[in-house]
């Protein structure tokens, strides 16, 4: 059985990490940071965009900036199915 994460990686998803800087609702001059991470598709980043839209619609702290990085951890050409295993004693 293949895990959900492995299926995502095999379909081209990579690990996306975003650092979101936002102002506190009651103290607009104080910045906070939030770290978000999920498997997403570059360059459109639908999951990250969806999360940022949710934030803007539902949360009070206005976003000041977003820094992100993306890395494909595995590609289909790097995957190899192993059919056996040796145990050395």
Image (cartoon, rainbow, N blue to C red):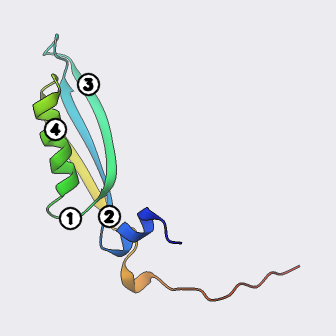
Residue 58 occupies quadrant: top left
Compute the Cα span from label 2 to label 4: 21 Å
- Counting from the top left corner in percent of width and height, residue 63 is at 14, 31
- Counting from the top left corner in percent of width and height, residue 22 is at 18, 28
The residue singled out by tag 2 in the image is 14
The residue singled out by tag 4 in the image is 54
In the displayed structure image, the side of residue 47 where residue 82 appears, left or right: right
Compute the Cα span from label 2 to label 1: 8 Å
In the displayed structure image, the side of residue 35 where residue 49 appears, left or right: left
Compute the Cα span from label 3 to label 4: 18 Å
Residue 33 occupies quadrant: top left
Position of 52 relative to 46 (above/below): above
- The label shown at residue 18 is none
The residue singled out by tag 1 in the image is 42
- Counting from the top left corner in percent of width and height, residue 29 is at 14, 15
Q: Residue at x 11, y 33 (%)?
A: 56
The residue singled out by tag 3 in the image is 32
Crowd rating for badge 2 (residues with CA inside 10 Å; few <14, some 14–19, many 20+): many
Kind of element beneath mark 1: loop
- CB under 8 Å between callouts 2 and 1? yes
Judge depth for marks 2 and 4 and give the one in front.
4
Crowd rating for badge 3 (residues with CA inside 10 Å; few <14, some 14–19, many 20+): few
């Amino acid at each position: 059985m293949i895990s959900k994460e492995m299926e995502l990686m095999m379909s081209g998803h990579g690990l996306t990490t975003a650092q979101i800087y936002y102002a506190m609702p009651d103290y607009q001059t104080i910045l906070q940071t939030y770290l978000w991470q999920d498997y997403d598709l570059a360059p459109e980043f639908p999951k990250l965009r969806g999360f940022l839209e949710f934030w803007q619609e539902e949360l009070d702290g206005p976003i000041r900036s977003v820094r992100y990085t993306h890395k494909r951890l595995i590609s289909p050409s790097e995957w190899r199915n192993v059919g056996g295993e040796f145990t050395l004693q």
